[in-house]
Amino acid sequence: MKNFIKPIMMTMVGIILLGALGFTIYRYYQQSGQVTEYLIADHIEQLAQTFKKIDDDVEIQNIMHDKSYIDFLNVVKFTGSEVGPLNIKYPDHWQGPYMQDNPTMQGKVYEIIKTREGYYIVPGEGVQLENGKIIGKDILFTHETDMESLVNDTIGLEYQRRPLIAPLSFKKHTLHADVTASELSSIED
């Protein structure tokens, strides 16, 4: 009888350990999506604050592309009036680096996207959100994208009431996609 109980006990202990391991793996994957979106929300806030600081320092005049990678915030010095996609009014006031490392999520840099409503900071193309949607595949950012409705939609571009995208606003004006560079240069000081 003693030999019969030992295998049963070992089997029960094995089942309990496998169940605990399975539960741990399940919780890890469940929480990893939440951590991803928490970090994206934090990065977006940090980037918005950084761009405000850059604008305060050098006055951003325009952003040169419809889609720009945010991979220039660690630049210390440069020549001319352009750094990354930014055309700036006072390049000699640049106080970089504004960040020691350019933030990334899942190995992708964040982007500035041009829409009819203006410019937005968004997670990089290929980033997978907790709901399984992938930026650039399931969620497309184009000139026609209504960014404000995306945040309020169930598509998942917010985390705990914190947006996963942010508009770029500047002290003198908001850069709108329908404003040309010549119109921007005519904005009075």
Image (tube, rainbow, N blue to C red):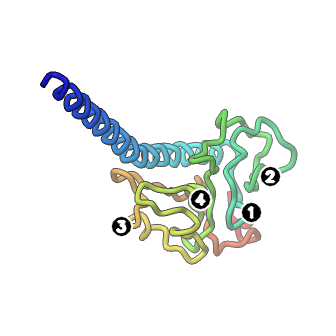
User: Could you tell whether 24 is left or right of 76 in the image?
Assistant: left
Q: Do the residues labelled 1 and 4 touch (CB within 8 Å)?
A: no
Cα gap from disc 2 to disc 1, whole angstroms = 9 Å
2 or 1: tag closer to the N-terminus: 1
**Residue 112 picture quarter:** bottom right
Q: Which of marks 3 and 4 is in front?
A: 4
Q: Residue 154 carries which label?
A: 3
2 or 4: tag closer to the N-terminus: 2
Say what secondary structure mark 2 lies in.
strand
- The residue carrying mark 2 is 82
Q: Which of 35 and 132 is in front in this view?
A: 132
Q: Nearer the viewer, residue 187 or 59?
A: 59
Residue 188 seen anywhere in this rendered image of the structure: yes
Cα gap from disc 3 to disc 2, whole angstroms = 38 Å
Q: Where is residue 141 in the image (x, y as percent from the top left)?
A: 57, 69
Q: Residue 22 carries which label?
A: none
Q: Residue 126 carries which label?
A: 4
Q: Where is residue 125 in the image (x, y as percent from the top left)?
A: 61, 60
> Taking 187 as reference, is 36 above or below it?
above
Q: Which mark is residue 64?
A: 1
